[in-house]
Each structure stands twice: as structure tokens, then as C-alpha cells.
Amino acid sequence: MRYIYLILISFLLVGCYGVKRAEKDLNKAHSKQPLVTANKFQSWYPISSDSHEVVKWRLQVDTLFQELIHDSVMIDTFINEKVRVIYKKINVIKQKIINAPAIYKIDSAKIYILEDKVRKAEKRSEKYFKKYKIFLYSTIAFVILFLLLWIYYLIKKK
């Protein structure tokens, strides 16, 4: 009987891994290691490749190609007229291909990772700039000291 109570109490304390607990763990992981969570989410949820405009443009070009194929099959009766129509449609297809819409992809996880790399690079450049300033000032001080000692030597020699 004692063991049953211990088992029940342990189940109550441990509980299930629910939505709130998962959200709490994700928030904790993101606050402590944001790059790890960004990399994981980027691998779990990749970017979709096509936007709405590109899909619409592809449908237009596909219908033009289907019409072109249909017209080329029917070419046996009116050859000259059909050839002119086919050339016009080919020119329309060329214009559609030239005016293809741009594809914009936004990946916030990748942006966050790259911003972190930029921040780290800026920190490194600041560190090297501080070392450069220290080296520059010490070199200037050494040159001034050398010139003063040289002038002192020339004055002492006369």
C-alpha cells in the first residue's frame, strides 16, 4: 500500500510533458543559447521556394506552351498563317520569360545567425583596433623619446 502511494505521488510530481512545459523549455533554451535554437528551427522548418507571383507566372508560361504545341500539331492545313501565329506566341513567351518576377526569400533564423556572426566580427575588429591604437601610441612615444634622446646627445656633444 505504501508503494502505491509513492508511485501515485511520483506520477503527480513528474506529470506529462505538455504544451506549456515545452514552451517554457524552448524559451529557456532560446534565452541561454539563441544560436542553437535558430539552427534547429532552420533545419526543422526550411523555407518554401516559390511565391504566389512565381506560381502564377509559371501557369501563364505553361498555358502559352500548351497553346503553341496545339497550334504546331494543327499546322498541316494553313502553314504560313500558323507559322506567323506560332512566331507571335514565341515572342509573347520570350517577353513573359524576360519579365519573370523576382523571388524573395526571408529566413529570419538565417538572418539571426548572420547578425550574430557580424556582431562577433565587430567585437574582434574592435579588439584589434584597440591593440592597433596601443601599438600606434607606443610607437609614437618611442619615436618621440628617440628624437629627444638624439637631440640631447647632439646638444651634449657640442
Image: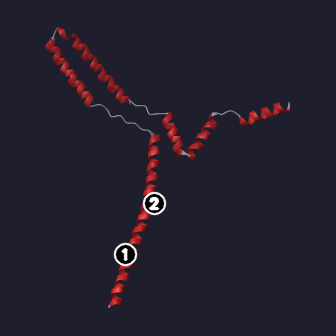
For the residue marked with disc 2, what is the amino acid? Lys
Q: Position of residue 145 (x, y in %)?
A: 39, 79
State the residue in front, 29 or 70.
29
Q: As drawn, is 60 to the left or to the right of 45?
A: left
For the N terminus, give its image quadrant.
top right
Query: Which mark is on residue 127?
Result: 2
Could you tell me which residue is drawn at 37 percent across and 75 percent down?
Answer: 143
For the residue marked with disc 1, what is the amino acid? Val
Q: As drawn, is 50 to the left or to the right of 84?
A: right
Could you tell me which residue is drawn at 41 percent across and 67 percent down?
Answer: 135
In the rendered image, which residue does mark 1 sit on?
143
Dot 1: within a 10 Å radius of its alpha carbon, few (fewer than 14), some, or many (20 or more) residues?
few
Find numbered disc 2 in the image and state the secondary structure of the residue it sits on: helix
For the C terminus, give its image quadrant.
bottom left
Q: Is residue 140 above or below residue 104?
A: below
Among the 4 quarters of the image, the one containing residue 140: bottom left
Dot 2: within a 10 Å radius of its alpha carbon, few (fewer than 14), some, or many (20 or more) residues?
few
